[in-house]
């Protein structure tokens, strides 16, 4: 783990751990695409080790530029870089 929290390396580590953790949560990672990653360092309970990752069902994402993203199919997880734990926050199918 990096001593400096919130670095680009932390983001990359959180994404890698989160994508791998999808299977632990029973989610087929091939069916989802990462659409957002945020550090929890700026939340009320500031925690430089936690990251929230948001995924969208691949079937709701247009194949070409300019398309409309479909409703639903959002999955949010939290990754704790200190413990390696991945927790599902919400899922809307």
Image (tube, helix red, strand yellow):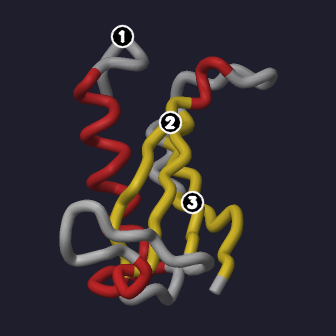
Between 14 and 85, which is closer to the camera in this rendering? 14
**Of marks 3 and 1, which one's residue comes earlier in the chain?**
1
Q: State the CA–CA distance, disc 2 to disc 3.
A: 11 Å
Q: Which residue is mark 3?
A: 77
Q: Quadrant of residue 10?
A: top left
Marker disc for residue 78: none
Q: Residue lying farthest right?
A: 44
Query: Label 2: few (<14), some or many (≥20) within 10 Å?
Result: some
The mark lying in front, picked from 3 and 1, is 3
Instruction: Name the spot of residue 71 as percent of width and height, x first.
Output: 59, 76
- What secondary structure is marked by label 2? strand
Residue at 53% across, 80% down: 25
Marks 3 and 1 sit apart, C-alpha to C-alpha, by 23 Å
Judged from the image, the secondary structure of the residue bearing numbered disc 1 is loop
**Number of the front mark, 2 or 1:** 2
Q: Quadrant of the C terminus?
A: bottom right
> Which image quadrant is residue 69 in?
bottom left
Mark 2 and mark 1: Cα distance apart in space: 16 Å
The residue under label 2 is 38
> Which residue is disc 1 drawn over?
4
> Mark 2 near mark 3, Cβ–Cβ under 8 Å?
no
Q: Tell me the quadrant of the picture where the N terminus can be found.
A: top left
Question: 10 Å neighbourhood of mark 3: few (<14), some, or many (≥20)?
Answer: many
Q: Look at the picture and state if 13 lies above or below 45.
A: below
Specify the quadrant of the image occupied by residue 30: bottom left
């Amino acid at each position: 783990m990096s001593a400096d929290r919130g670095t680009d390396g932390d983001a990359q580590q959180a994404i890698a751990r989160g994508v791998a953790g999808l299977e632990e949560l029973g989610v087929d990672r091939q069916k989802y695409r990462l659409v957002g990653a945020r550090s929890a360092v700026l939340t009320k309970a500031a925690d430089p080790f936690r990251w929230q990752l948001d995924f969208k069902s691949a079937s709701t994402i247009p194949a070409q530029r300019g398309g409309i993203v479909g409703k639903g199919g959002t999955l949010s997880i939290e990754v704790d870089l200190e413990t390696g734990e991945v927790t599902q926050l919400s899922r809307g199918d």
